[in-house]
Image (cartoon, rainbow, N blue to C red):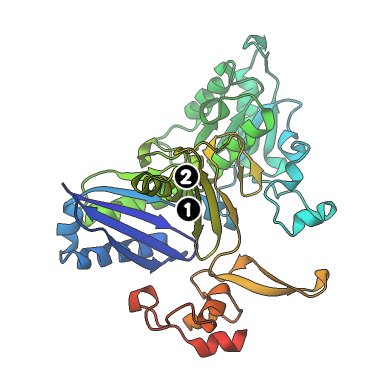
C-alpha cells in the first residue's frame, strides 16, 4: 500500500500528515507562505520525503493520494483580488444583491461590531452596481416561459459589460432553477461571441448550475462568490498540480470539501472548499471518538489565526448549516457546521478605548509573517503565542520540532 499525504493550509502554518500502509504516521509543519502557497506546500512535501529517507521522486512516485484542504478561496475574498465580473440578471432585479435580505447587513460581522448593530456597514459588493445589467425576460415559478429572451438583448448586455472591463460573467435570472433555458441561452450566446480558442475568451457561471435552489438573494450570492474565487483557485491549483507531477506524483490532487467529502480538482466547485480544513478536523475527531468509544464530542482546533469548534453527537456529524456565511455573504450551499472565532495563537492583544480601555484579543492576527514577536521576524505586537511563551507554556528551544527558536525577551518587550 502506498503513501497517503494529507495537507491543511492555515493562516499561519501548513500542516502535513503522511502514512504508509499500517505504519506510523509522520507529521511536519511549515510556515504558510501567503505570497505563494505552493512554496510552503512543497517545502513540507520535501520535509516528509526526508523523514522517509527517500528522494522526492521516490516519495511522490510511491504516493497514492494527496488530500488538500486549502484557504485559496478564503484568501481571495479577504484580499479582494478576484477578477472584475459582470452580472446579468432579470430586468427590474438589478439591485437584488445590494438590497440583500433583512439581516444581510449583519452577516459575517465580528463580535465587537454586533454589540453596536447600528454602526455595522454592509459588506462591500464583489460586483459593483455599474457592472450589473438586466435582460427583458421572465420564467414563472412553475418554469413556464412568460416573456421570451431575445438574442439581441443578450448581445447588447454583453457589449456593455465587456466595454466596462468584465473578465467574466455571472448569469442569475429569476426562477432559473425551475427552468434554466434562458440562462443557458445567455451562456450559448457568450460562448459563440467569445469562444475558447479566442484570447479574449470569458468564463460564464450560471446560477442554475452552481446553485439551482429557490431563494433569489442566496442563489445570486452563492454564484457570485463561486465565480469570484474560481479563477484564482484554478490558477494556483494548476500550478500546484504541475509541481507535484514534476516531482513524480502520478495521481490527481484531491480537494477536501466543506460537506465532509473530497473530489478531484477538476470536479470541484470553488465555493465548496470554504472552511474545509476545520470540517476535515471534525471528521478526525469523529474517527478518534469511534476508536475510544466516545459518541458525544466537542471538537476544537486552535490554529494561528482562528479557533474552530464543532460537535459530534450520537457518534455522527448531525449539525449542518444550510445557509452558511462565507466572509460577509450568506450562501445556500449546505456545509457541516464548524464555528470559528478570531482567537488563534497569532491573535493580537489590544486595548479597546471605546469600551473603557478593556483588553481584547483578536480577531486581527499576526499570521506567519511577521508572526508573533518571539519569531524575531519583525512582529511588534503582543500575541497569544507571546503570552504562552512568557507564561512558560511553550519550550522556546523545541518549537516546531526545534526548527524555529523563540526569543522570549522579544515577547516580554512587546507585552
Q: Position of residue 356 (x, y in %)?
A: 83, 73
Count of all numbered marks drawn on residues in the image: 2
Q: Can residue 223 be seen in the rendering of this structure?
A: yes
In the picture shown, does residue 385 fall above or below 214? Answer: below
Instruction: Residue 251: name its quadrant.
Output: top left
In the picture shown, does residue 129 fall above or below 400? Answer: above
Q: Can residue 377 be seen in the rendering of this structure?
A: no
In the picture shown, does residue 101 fall above or below 189? Answer: below
The foreground one among 58 and 88 is 58
Q: Is residue 17 left or right of residue 414?
A: left
In the picture shown, does residue 96 fall above or below 34? Answer: above
- Which residue, given by chain and number where applicable, does mark 1 sit on? 72
Q: Position of residue 345 (x, y in %)?
A: 53, 69
- Which residue, given by chain and number where applicable, does mark 2 sit on? 273
**Residue shown at 71%/49% (left/top)?**
123
Q: Point out the frontmost of discs 2 and 1.
A: 2
Quadrant of the frame with the C terminus: bottom right
Amino acid at each position: 500500500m502506498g503513501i497517503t499525504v494529507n495537507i491543511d493550509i492555515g493562516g499561519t502554518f501548513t500542516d502535513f500528515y503522511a502514512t504508509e500502509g499500517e505504519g506510523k504516521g509522520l507529521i511536519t509543519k511549515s510556515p504558510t507562505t501567503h505570497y505563494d502557497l505552493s512554496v510552503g506546500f512543497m517545502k513540507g512535501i520535501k520535509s516528509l520525503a526526508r523523514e522517509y529517507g527517500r528522494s522526492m521522486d521516490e516519495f511522490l512516485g510511491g504516493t497514492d493520494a494527496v488530500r488538500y484542504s486549502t484557504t485559496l478561496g478564503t484568501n481571495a475574498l479577504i484580499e479582494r483580488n478576484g477578477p472584475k465580473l459582470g452580472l446579468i440578471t432579470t430586468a427590474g432585479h438589478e439591485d437584488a444583491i445590494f438590497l440583500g435580505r433583512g439581516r444581510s447587513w449583519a452577516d459575517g460581522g465580528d463580535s465587537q461590531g454586533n454589540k453596536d448593530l447600528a454602526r455595522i456597514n454592509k459588506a462591500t459588493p464583489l460586483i459593483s452596481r455599474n457592472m450589473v445589467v438586466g435582460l427583458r425576460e421572465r420564467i414563472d415559478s412553475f418554469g413556464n416561459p412568460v416573456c421570451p429572451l431575445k438574442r439581441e438583448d443578450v448581445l447588447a448586455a454583453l457589449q456593455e459589460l465587456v466595454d466596462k472591463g468584465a473578465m467574466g460573467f455571472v448569469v442569475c435570472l429569476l426562477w432559473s432553477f425551475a427552468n434554466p433555458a434562458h440562462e443557458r441561452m445567455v451562456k450559448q450566446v457568450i460562448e459563440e461571441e467569445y469562444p475558447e480558442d479566442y484570447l479574449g475568451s470569458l468564463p460564464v457561471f450560471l446560477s442554475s448550475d452552481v446553485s439551482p435552489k429557490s431563494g433569489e438573494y442566496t442563489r445570486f450570492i452563492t454564484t457570485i462568490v463561486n465565480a469570484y474565487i474560481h479563477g484564482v483557485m484554478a490558477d494556483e491549483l494548476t500550478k500546484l498540480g504541475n509541481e507535484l507531477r514534476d516531482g513524480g506524483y502520478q495521481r490527481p490532487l484531491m480537494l477536501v470539501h466543506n460537506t465532509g467529502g473530497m473530489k478531484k480538482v477538476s470536479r470541484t466547485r470553488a465555493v465548496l472548499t470554504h472552511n474545509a480544513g476545520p470540517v476535515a478536523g471534525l471528521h478526525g475527531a469523529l474517527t478518534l471518538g469511534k476508536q475510544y468509544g466516545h459518541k458525544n464530542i466537542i471538537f476544537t482546533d486552535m490554529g494561528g489565526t482562528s479557533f474552530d469548534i464543532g460537535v459530534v453527537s450520537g457518534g455522527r456529524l448531525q449539525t449542518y448549516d444550510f445557509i452558511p456565511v462565507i466572509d460577509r455573504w450568506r450562501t445556500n450551499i449546505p456545509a457541516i457546521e464548524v464555528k470559528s472565532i478570531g482567537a488563534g495563537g497569532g491573535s493580537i492583544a489590544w486595548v479597546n478605548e471605546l469600551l473603557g480601555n478593556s483588553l481584547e484579543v483578536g480577531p486581527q492576527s499576526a499570521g506567519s509573517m511577521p508572526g508573533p514577536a518571539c519569531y524575531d521576524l519583525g512582529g511588534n505586537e503582543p500575541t497569544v503565542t507571546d503570552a504562552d511563551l512568557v507564561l512558560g507554556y511553550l519550550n522556546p528551544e523545541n518549537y516546531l520540532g526545534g526548527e524555529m527558536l523563540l526569543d522570549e525577551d522579544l515577547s516580554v518587550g512587546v507585552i
